[in-house]
Structures are given as structure tokens and as C-alpha cells.
Image (cartoon, helix red, strand yellow):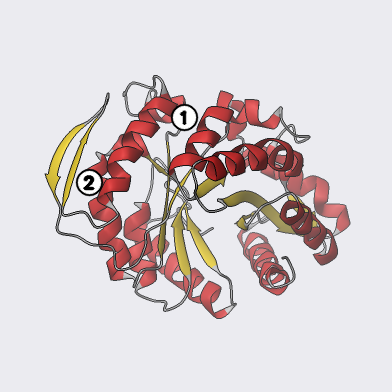
Amino acid sequence: MIGAERGDSGRKVTRMLDEVVWAEEAGLDTVWVPQVPSDFDALVAVTMMGARTSRIEFLTAVIPLQIQHPIALARQALSAQAAIGGRLALGVGPSHHWIVRDMLGLAYERPAAYTRNYLEVLSAAVTGATSVDVENDEFRVHNPLDLEPVSPLPVLVSALGPVMLRLAGERADGTVLWMADERAIGEHVLPKITKAAGDAGRPAPRIVAGLPVCACSSTEVVTARERANRILAEAKTSPNYQRLMEKGDARNVGDLLAAGDDDAILKRFQRFADAGVTDLSVRILPIGANRDELIASKRQTRDVIAALSAEVR
């Protein structure tokens, strides 16, 4: 994952460009770009980083649907996809009440139904249609569109519950997850989304699992878990995440953290692969008492991820 962190905008740009160059040179397959409510625009970041790379894929993880009209999002995504040579996969989702309602002041009612209606417009717009003509319970769209995808533009949907997983299987190319452990994926996510895709005659879906990672000694694992629970505590405010965690064994993000030496992290990666995950979206979690220690920890974890990535299949 490469995205917004603390610091002024100029330094964020420099950091993102440095990190994406490293990721491509390290042989990683995909850069996952979050859309943080208070920070950098994900598709602008994708376009910017794509200009500095030639091979690596970019996936937004994820853009809240409510922040813009589906035609506007399709236009922005198709423009970014053309700018980076077709290496974009678009991750979207209905977000959470604390973002949509509490931050933006928008309605957060029937998010699954809203997502279904939104995807009907978005899917029509990203396939190369010269006119998008869709009428449903949410949208009345009759919009000419001269942008064609330079290659197929996959759309993945954040889906945590059974209704959203069925929708992602039927209408999208996969799902992007957070706060889902191995058992929740293997017993809850995988069977529901795979069956929905199969029933709809679609290919097997891509299942992207977000996973915090910290390379450290065995004596530092507790410290890493404590820090994860302190700075990545979204589940405390999100009923969506709480319900998802009930499907697995993790009770907080610290339980989800892959921490320890190379062997411990590899074994955790492999358990996710065995559960049916097709992609791991790694959120580096550095530890340390000061800036220098945090930077050193981040680089150590980054190097471990690069070394292990080819071993997980």
C-alpha cells in the first residue's frame, strides 16, 4: 500500500514517487492506493505514480462511491487508465457511516442497494459505450461519453457482508477486504462471492486481503500488535468491520497483523493464500521510539515483503 501519511503535500508526493519506484524495481505486482477521507486523491496519486513506472499495476483500495457521480468517477478512472497505459484496476465501495454520514453529511441508507444502482451506471460507462443510458431507483443517466478504455478496466468492490459479497460476485471482478482474517475469508468471503460469480457466469473473482505487516524480532511482536491497535483501530467505529470479524478468529487489527521474522510472516502469508486470497495488500506497520527507528523498521519490513512475495502462491 502506498498512500497518504502525515506530512506536507510536497513531501508526500516525493515519498509516493520514491516508494513506487522501489516497488516496481523490487518486483512487486501491484500498488494499492487508499482513498483516505482527509488526504490525497487516490486517482491523482495513481496517475502521478504511473508516470514514473512502466509495469506495475495500480488498484484503488477503495474509493467511496458517495463522493462523486458514477459518470464523474468513470471519466476520472478512464483518464487515469489511459495515462498509465491500462494498468489500473478500480476499487470502490459504499464506505462507512462515520465517513459518509458523519464527515460528509450525506445519507447512508441501504448502502448495498445504492452500490448496485451505482455499479449499473459505472459498469456501462467503463466498457467503452458512446452513450450511457441507465435509469434505476437512484440514477437517471443519459450521458454521451467519448472515452474508451485502453484495455479492460476491472472494477472491484469492498464487500464484507453476504449481500455485498453476492453483489460483488454478480456485478464486479472481485472484492477488496480489510479486517478479514484467514477463517473469515475461507469460510465466509470465498464461498459466497465465488458462488455468486459462478451463478452469474462470471470468471472466478479476485479476492484482495488487506494485511498489516511488521518485520521484527519475536520479542517485539507484542509491541507491534499494540501499535497496530492504537493507529489502525477502524473496527471500533465500524459495525461493518465488527460483523466481519465475528466470522473469523481476529478480534482486533493486532490479531490480524503479520509480525515476526521472515518465516513467521511467510507462514501467515501462506495461510491467507490457502484460504483463497488471490492478492495480499500489505500495509507496512513500522515500530520504533523515534523517527529514525520508524524509518529503519519500515525499510526492514519492506525488504522482507519484497523477498517473500515470490514465495507465496
177 horizontally vs 311: left or right: left
Residue 100 in percent (x, y) is at 38, 28
Nearest to the eye among marks 2 and 1: give it.
Answer: 2
Residue most extreme to the right = 219
**Residue nearer the viewer, 189 or 196:** 196
Residue 36 in percent (x, y) is at 43, 44
Name which quarter of the figure residue 268 lies in. Answer: bottom right
Mark 1 closeness class: few <14, some 14–19, many ≥20 residues within 10 Å: some
> Residue visible at 71% across and 30% down?
247
Precedes in sequence: disc 2 or disc 1: 2
- Above or below, 38 against 48 in this view is above
Q: Quadrant of the C terminus?
A: bottom right
Q: Which residue is mark 1?
A: 96
> Under tag 2, what secondary structure?
helix
Mark 2 closeness class: few <14, some 14–19, many ≥20 residues within 10 Å: few
Distance from Cα at disc 2 to Cα at disc 1: 21 Å
Name which quarter of the figure residue 150 lies in. Answer: bottom left
- Above or below, 14 against 291 in this view is below
Q: Quadrant of the N terminus?
A: bottom right
- Above or below, 191 against 205 in this view is above
- Above or below, 125 against 195 in this view is below
> Under tag 1, what secondary structure?
loop
> Residue visible at 60% across and 40% down?
195
> Residue visible at 53% across and 53% down?
203
Residue 179 in percent (x, y) is at 64, 39
Residue 226 in view: no
**Residue nearer the viewer, 289 or 193:** 193
Amino acid type shown at disc 1: His
Residue 110 in percent (x, y) is at 41, 21
Residue 72 is labelled as: 2
Residue 54 is labelled as: none
Amino acid type shown at disc 2: Ala
